[in-house]
Image: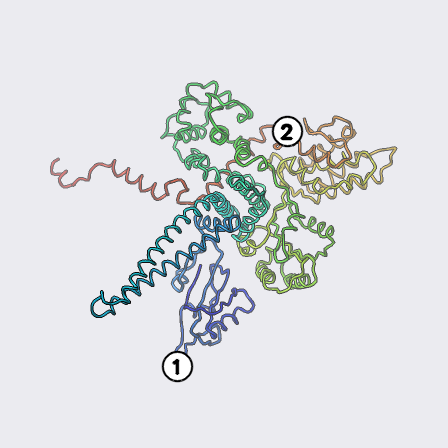
Amino acid sequence: MWIKNKESNNELQITSLNHKYFRTHLEDSLSLGRPLLIEDVGEELDPVIDNVLEKNFIKSGSIEKVVVGDKECDVMPGFMLYITTKLPNPAYSPEISAKTSIIDFTVTILGLEEQLLGRVILMEKSDLEAERVALFESVMKNQRSMKELESNLLCRLTSTQGSLVDDEALIHVLQETKLTAEEVNQKLKVSAHTERKINVAREEFRAVASRGSILYFLIVEMSNVNVMYQNSLKQFLNIFDNSITKSTKSSVTDERIANILSYLTYEVWAFTLRSLYERHKILFTLMLAMKIDCHKGLISHDEFSAFIKGGASLDLNAVEPKPFRWILDITWLNLVEISKLSTFSDVLTKIEQNEKDWRVWYEKERPEEEVIPCGYNSSLDVFRKLLLIRSWSPDRTLSQARKYIMESLGSDYGETIILDLDATWAESEPRTPLICILSIGSDPSPQVTALAKQKEIPLKSVSMGQGQEMHARRLIADSMSGGGWVLLQNIHLSLPFCNEAMDALVETENVHDTFRLWMTTEVHAQFPIALLQMAIKFTNEPPQGIRASLKRTYQNITQDTLDYSSQPQWPPLLYAVAFLHTVVQERRKFGPLGWNVSYEFNQADFAASFQFIQNHLDDMDPKKGISWQTVCYMLGEVQYGGRVTDDFDKRLLTTFTHVWFCDVLLRPGFEFYKNYKVPMSKNLQDYIDYINGLPSTDTPEVFGLHTNADITYQINTAKGILDTILNVQPKEGGGGGGETRESVVYRLADDMLEKLPKEYNSFEVCRKS
């Protein structure tokens, strides 16, 4: 938003409403006659500027004055007021709208594409861009020369007296104009030809700019999923530039473009995934794949709509009746919806004619792994199979969606990104805050403390709340000058201090190279957008799946850790504790089927269990061996059991410990479940290799649950993802020529009006009857 008051070309003063010198900046700008820019306002403006906005100026002789608060200030010529906001769609009151001129500077997808094309050409083909600029200047110069000659000729013609034939100077000017005109026209023809060549060369890199624009607007869309997922264009442009400078070089243009696209897409995906909650990661990756394929023309808008909406908008009584009772109503509506697509135009007929084949396929445990009846298995690509699976078996949608993602984007996108706090810190700069978005059991404070200790950097932390602002202010000031890290925990409890911390990062002249500001916060609708957009954001939730969770655990384990104890029981015991930690966390996703109460099992529980096992082995009598009773009691009743309040949950937890933590654990061939063994090795790499070989998705039986436990979880997760994708789509139709809500209503209304009988005159009807 841009709010303009008067015109000026003077030096611009930048401030914000919460700046400690805001009043001084406003008064100085008024009295000195220079423009003022107020940044990052919300939906409410400070009443102190009301008189300025309303132009309540007092005439005092030749000078105008205005009352600012309790002070009268001169309004000098040249004063101008600009106000900007980072709010995506601010709802300003009619009063503010009447006082100001509101201008939307929001970047559009095509506008950003042109900007990115200029950037990539400037970096990849700098000589081409320089030639384009020089050509533009040459054309302008030649056109200006023509204009001057025409003006000179007209001036001569109007000022000449007598016969034009006798005026030798005029004849000379005419000859010069003719020669110059021919020369300029020749240059303009050459310029036009050169410009076409340059545009052809520029267009080769259009694909990079288009992909960049798609990626940026996708990550902007994620702010509609969660208010904390805010990213700035500046952050994106940094990744975009890195994709050009750091991607693999090649003299072949097509190969070079493919390298840039691959690097850019993966870096944006990894950067965004780091700041998302686990439940939103598959959502973002799926949206990424579909957006790219929609832009390539591989997926039509109708197919995209059918995938996210299904048959929810259809009426069972208004469609063709289902042929068999065993088909669920919602399944039939989904099938009717996709039958509108050319690919599935005859699917309803084929189902009716081949009931047995479709029923056998439908009742398979994993229908996406089986052969689809009626030749669809060979005729459908992976996305169209996803459409069919989503219609028939909603609980298998995510499984097929992962196949589609890996087919569309690559196998790397099927893996979960494990948070690497060291790499995250390495990306940051002294003026870049690092913000962890909290959830149950995801406090990163112990990891930040361990990293600071590893880097030998002093860390000072404070838990925010009432009265802690002064202490935090002092810690930040000291660390900025002397170096070190500051950790502000639960910063959402002191939201006004966020703006002060942001101003300190921006305005402090000298900041020590080792200074970093870490923050943890819960989701809060009023959290400053500007702070989120300048920060490196990350979440610290345990990743989903046994493989991903064990990879995260062993990421923090070194070879020295495995060599800590000479006892042969140490490595397998450590792995068993890590496996138990994973299972108790993974059961939470099944809701009441997993635990009657959702417990906050976290990394601290594993750390305490890890330490206990170390101490127990240190004190162990080699002749007596491990006291399994003690181990089971400490793990099942104290370390993890200390959180458990429900009797049945306690019974379940102790069962896990007694079945797994016994002499059988140390015997070759022991399995927690089929194909989930304990590697018998003292080499860390052997454990990592074994973990990488585990399945990417786990059957509920690994967690001690029936296979049907996964159905409800998968259905609810898929429904949540599809509903979220639908909700973040533009409310007035998507791309590809989709109708807006208004046009649909008008079309239906016109259709109804056409079906109504003609109007009649009641008096005539009464008379005829």
Residue 243 visible in rendering: yes
**Residue occupying the far right of the picture:** 623
Q: Residue at x 40, y 62 (%)?
A: 101
> Of discs 2 and 1, which sits in the foreground?
1
Q: Residue at x 55, y 47 (%)?
A: 244
Q: Residue at x 47, y 67 (%)?
A: 47
Q: Give residue 445's position: percent from left, percent from top.
A: 68, 50
Residue 421 lies, with reference to residue 661, above or below; the image says below
Q: Please tell me how many numbered marks the rendered image carries.
A: 2
Q: Residues within 10 Å of mark 1 (few under 14, many from 20)?
A: few
Is 370 in front, or is 176? 176
Q: Quadrant of residue 259?
A: top right
Residue 240 lies, with reference to residue 327, above or below; the image says below
Q: Say the numbered circle drawn on residue 545.
A: none
Q: Is residue 241 left or right of residue 738?
A: right
**Residue occupying the far bottom of the picture:** 61
- Please tell me which of labels 2 and 1 falls first in the chain: 1
Where disc 2 sits, the SS reads helix
Q: Give residue 282's position: percent from left, percent from top.
A: 55, 39
Q: Say the numbered circle drawn on residue 61.
A: 1
Q: Quadrant of the N terminus?
A: bottom left
Q: Quadrant of residue 316?
A: top left
Q: CA distance from mark 2 to mark 1?
A: 88 Å
- Report the amino acid beneath label 2: Glu
Q: Residues within 10 Å of mark 2 (few under 14, many from 20)?
A: some
Is 23 in front, or is 467? 23
Q: Label 2: which residue?
A: 701
Is 84 in front, or is 651? 84
Q: Is residue 617 left or right of residue 186?
A: right
